[in-house]
Image: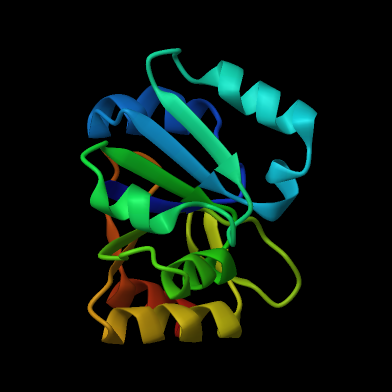
Amino acid sequence: MISLVRVDNRLIHGQVVEAWLPHLKVDRVAVADDEAAQNALIRAAMGLAVQPSIEVMIQRVAELPWSRIVNDDVRTLVLVRDVKDAVEASARGLALHKLNLGNIHFATGRKQVSPSVYLSPEEVQQLADLAKQGVAVDARGTPNDRAVTFEEIRERFEKA
């Protein structure tokens, strides 16, 4: 059972461990990231950052058992590095109802839409497509932050 899908290019880090995990009360974190899945050191470090009672799965986007994650009774936080991976996960069976944009770093061609989220025109279009499918998209760093809605994200992008 999916509690939240979060785009965060840092994947598992302090903000996720200290704010999101207690807020969501999840029993599993599923990291869908090709780079992390191929690096044993990164997998080990991320696994150690999460309390032992929470299962940590770190696999390539194409290899996560999406059907099981969506349909079992284990409350799960799904983390992906970028919007592209969220779209791919959705195409592979991730039932996407809510998408939180947590941290997407600046890169050439990206515009700032929240304190920690920068988006490219392609990413805004991908998010618009998801929103049209009924996905509630928001940007916020922690659960206590005010959620920036997709409409606000689009307005900020156009003004930036």
Numbered disc total: 0
Q: Residue at x 67, y 22 (%)?
A: 45
In this picture, residue 16 sits left or right of residue 75: right
Q: Which image quadrant for residue 137?
A: bottom left
Regarding residue 146, the answer to whether it shows in the image is: no
In this picture, residue 111 sits left or right of residue 2: right
Q: Which image quadrant for residue 143?
A: top left
Give the color scheme: rainbow, by chain, secondary structure or one colour: rainbow
> Residue 31, image x and y in percent?
53, 44
| Residue 33 position (above or below residue 126) | above
> Residue 22, image x and y in percent?
29, 24
> Could you say which is closer to the camera, residue 12 or residue 141?
12
> Could you say which is closer to the camera, residue 118 or residue 128?
128
Q: Residue at x 38, y 72 (%)?
A: 153
In this picture, residue 36 sits left or right of residue 76: right
Q: Residue lying farthest top?
A: 52
Q: Residue at x 59, y 16 (%)?
A: 48
> Could you say which is closer to the camera, residue 73 or residue 154?
73
Regarding residue 92, the answer to whether it shows in the image is: yes
> Residue 50, image x and y in percent?
49, 20
| Residue 65 position (above or below residue 129) | above
Q: Which image quadrant for residue 112?
A: bottom right
> Residue 61, image x and y in percent?
58, 58
Q: Residue at x 39, y 67 (%)?
A: 93
